[in-house]
Amino acid sequence: MVAYIGEIEKKYHKKGDAFFTAWIIKREYKREELCQSELLYVQIGKVFEPAGEECGTLYDESNACIRCGVGRTQMNALTLDLKQIKMHVDIAKTIAGEVIVSSQFKQAWEDAKLSGAVFSDVYQKGRKPTLVDTWYQLQIDSQPLEIISPTIAGTDPFNFEDAERYVCDKHVLGLNLISEITVSRNSWNSGDMLTTKQAFGWKQGLLMPERPLILSQNAWDCLCNAEIKGYSVEVVHMK
Ligand SMILES: [Zn+2]
């Protein structure tokens, strides 16, 4: 069925038209499949704006890749308009990929003595930005995982757009992650909060390439027990 949609889209695309204009890949797993996966890819449900740089967060772009945008350096504490979150979640990210977690998330992580995450101060934007004690910026200090084949990246599930345009040999595999993620087992040094060496996405205005957020099975179990909300997980394959 999916291949058939691809054929129809191809015909439309040749005429400069589109059969579909948006797509979301949803993978459903049995609880046992998730419980047996040593690593899990975190999909954050709440994505909000404005981005940090619209609220007073400063970035030094002088070391960023001129092709894809990866590698800018954050120069001050993350400053956001947290009022835009408007729902009860324990994890959220901006359209620029800045990830924040609630104080409950931080507490659960620290109580379980999990590794790989650093929680930094977050400020509420304003004439004088104010430090908040309800949110923290999530940063990762574990060794990055290496994404390997058969992971597929592309512009869309059928790759009709110019997929190569969004590949940076040094940093970015493609505009979007299309398949499940497979990582090299040798690249995992047992950290509980991880990201990958390679990113997906492209610098377009405020949008930046992002690296997937990955949890160990133990970390996921602890977050579930602490009733941490606002994300779903997918299986990560390792070989
Ligand atoms: Zn690059």
Image (tube, grey):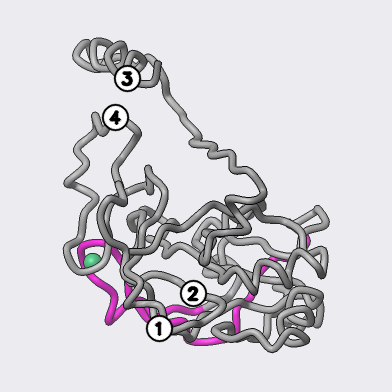
User: Residue at the location (42% across, 65% down)?
Assistant: 211
Of callouts 1 and 4, which one flags the residue occurring earlier in the amino acid sequence? 1
Where residue 81 sits in the image (x, y, percent)? 70, 65
Q: Which mark is residue 143?
A: 1
Q: Earlier in the sequence, mark 1 or mark 2?
A: 1
What's drawn in magenta, residue-wise? 58-83
Q: CA distance from mark 3 to mark 4?
A: 9 Å
What type is the residue that disc 3 sits on?
A: Ala
Q: Amino acid at mark 4?
A: Phe
Image quadrant in which you'd find residue 111: bottom right
- The tag on residue 194 is 2
Residue 72 is situated, as x and y percent measured from the top left of the image, at 36, 77
Kind of residue at badge 1: Gln
Q: CA distance from mark 1 to mark 4?
A: 32 Å
Q: Are marks 1 and 2 in contact (CB under 8 Å)?
A: yes
The residue that mark 4 highlights is 158
Disc 3 CB within 8 Å of nearest ligand 1 atom: no
| Vertical side of 120 occupied by 210: above or below | above
SS at mark 3? helix
Mark 2 or mark 3: whose residue is earlier in sequence = 3
**Disc number for residue 3:** 3
Q: Is most of the magenta stretch helix, strand or loop?
A: loop
The CA distance from mark 2 to mark 3 is 34 Å
Label 1 crowd (10 A; few <14 / some 14-19 / many >=20): some
